[in-house]
Image (cartoon, rainbow, N blue to C red):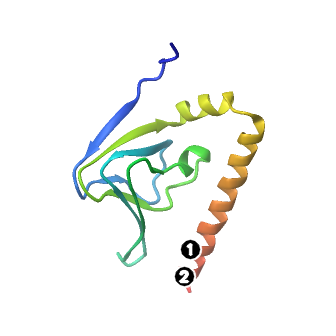
Amino acid sequence: MGHDVLIERKVFPQGDIIFKQGTTGHTAYIVQKGSVDIVREGDDEEQVLLGTVGVGGIFGEMAVIDDSPRMATARAAEPTTVIIITEQMFLNKLSKADPFIRGLMNIMADTIRSMGKKAHNELQK
């Protein structure tokens, strides 16, 4: 049947931190119910809201594509249910994908990473 992977879900109350900026974690998340604020934390406790991920949206995926630390903090904006995508699940799916898709993923990861660095450097000025 191909149901070898059990879908893992997690429920977060409003205001709960799903992951913190700077931590590592080999998981991505899909919002099943609720919404998640993606917040970038500055040096002096200031927080910049980068965006909100709604139902069906994915976040935290960079940590699965490469092992870099989280570029922002994810916080439940309301009571939220997420589906957890582990690195292993992702790699299993990716290994079945066309090599072109795999190459594309790596290029996209690099692009997003350099955009993140640029934004970070702008903030430092």
Question: What residue is pinned by disc 1?
Answer: 120
Q: Where is residue 67 in the image (x, y as percent from the top left)?
A: 58, 47
Q: Name the amino acid, label 2.
A: Gln
Q: From this view, report whether residue 30 is shown above or below residue 5.
A: below
Quarter of the figure that contains the C terminus: bottom right
Which of the labelled discs sits on residue 77, or is there none? none
Q: Where is residue 24 in the image (x, y as percent from the top left)?
A: 49, 49
Q: Do the residues labelled 1 and 2 touch (CB within 8 Å)?
A: yes
Q: Is residue 55 toward the left or the right of residue 1 in the image?
A: left
Q: Looking at the image, which residue is at 44% across and 60% down?
A: 21
- Are there few (<14), some (14-19), or many (20+) residues within 10 Å of tag 1? some
Give how far across and how far down residue 4 sits, in percent. Answer: 48, 18
Residue 78 appears left or right of 28: left
Residue drawn at x 58%, y 81% is 122
Name the kind of residue labelled 1 in the image: His
Instruction: Give whichever of 56, 60 is nearer the camera.
Output: 56
Q: Where does label 2 land, which residue?
A: 124
The answer to which of 44 and 53 lies nearer the viewer is 53
Is 26 placed above or below 5 here?
A: below
Which residue of the protein is positioned furthest toward the bottom in this rendering?
A: 125
Q: For the image shown, how many numbered marks are present on the structure?
A: 2
Please, what secondary structure does the residue beneath circle 1 have?
helix
In percent of width and height, residue 74 lies at: 38, 57
Name the residue nearer the viewer: 74 or 55: 55
Q: With 6 as the anchor, is 92 left or right in this view?
A: right
Cα gap from disc 1 to disc 2, whole angstroms: 6 Å
- Residue furthest to the front: 55
**What residue lies at 59% left-to-right and 77% top-to-bottom?**
121
Residue at 27% of width from left, 42% of height from top? Answer: 11
* Rendered position, 91 above or below 3: below
